[in-house]
Image: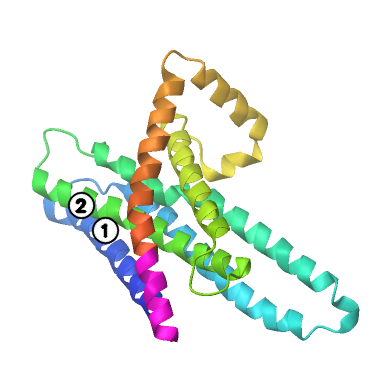
Amino acid sequence: MSALLVAAAAVVLLNIYAVVLVVLRARVYGVRLYRPMLVNIGLSFLPVLIALLLTAGLIALVPAIGAAPERFSGVAPFALWIYLLVATVAWLLLFPNSVYLITELNFSHRTEPTPVPLWYDIIQTLALTLSGIANAVLSLAVVHLLATVLFDTEGDAIPAPSWIFAGIVIVLGAVGVYLGRYLRFNSWDVRHPTSMGRKLVAHLRQRGKALEAGGFVITHALLIALLYVPLFLLVWTAILSGSS
């Protein structure tokens, strides 16, 4: 577990570094503070907070359920699964906000002429993007570890269903990024599924848009997967080593 704590601390520092660079850009070079970047950093960190709250809630609930009177023995597990479902859905809706920071690499905040040197904007935007990817990887790792425990496998192997879960989340995250960047949907727009569906269908019916969407989702999902899988395996190995 110490490996996960070290990873969490590193991710927090990376987020702070990204915030500092955004603020310093305005202070040092006398340009307007680009507030959307600060908002996006906050939104991208929300999945990490939700994942940690999900874990803390589960840790608190399991002993309470184990100590429940017998007459509640049938209700308690059901309440636990309802909690897991609601918390996981909330986390999943916010998860694309982390991956979304990849799209900041288009430098939409930079206007010419500007006193800000290009090298500064490169470092600032790269730090911003990496903070989002780190938030995505960390929050998914926390929930993936929970899924691994819940699927309860014997030995040190990671159960296949938990990998399938992680893969689905990564793909859905890429879909969410596409919807946010090109259709300007937000996580809370799920309150209007009919309107979202109509806009999505109308968008995909445009010439070449379905192919573009497919390419976007595949390339983004593969990028996150290539980063996530080895990092999760390293954390898993560290956890096993620490427990042995």
Range of residues picked out in magenta:
233-244
On the image, the x and y values in percent for residue 165 come to 55, 53
124 relative position to 8: left or right: left
State whether residue 5 appears in this view.
no
Circles 1 and 2 in contact, beta carbons < 8 Å: yes
Q: What SS does tag 1 mark?
A: helix
Up the image or down, 227 lies above or below 157; here it is above
Q: Is residue 179 above or below residue 208?
A: below
Q: Percent position (x, y) of residue 155?
A: 52, 75
Which residue does the image show at 21% across and 57% down from the upper left?
A: 21
> Is residue 22 toward the left or the right of residue 167 in the image?
left
Give the residue pinned by disc 2. Answer: 124
Residue drawn at 55 percent across, 18 percent down:
202
Horizontal and vertical percent position of residue 148: 55, 66
**Residue receiving disc 1:** 18
Q: Can residue 168 be seen in this snapshot?
A: yes
Q: Secondary structure at mark 2?
A: helix
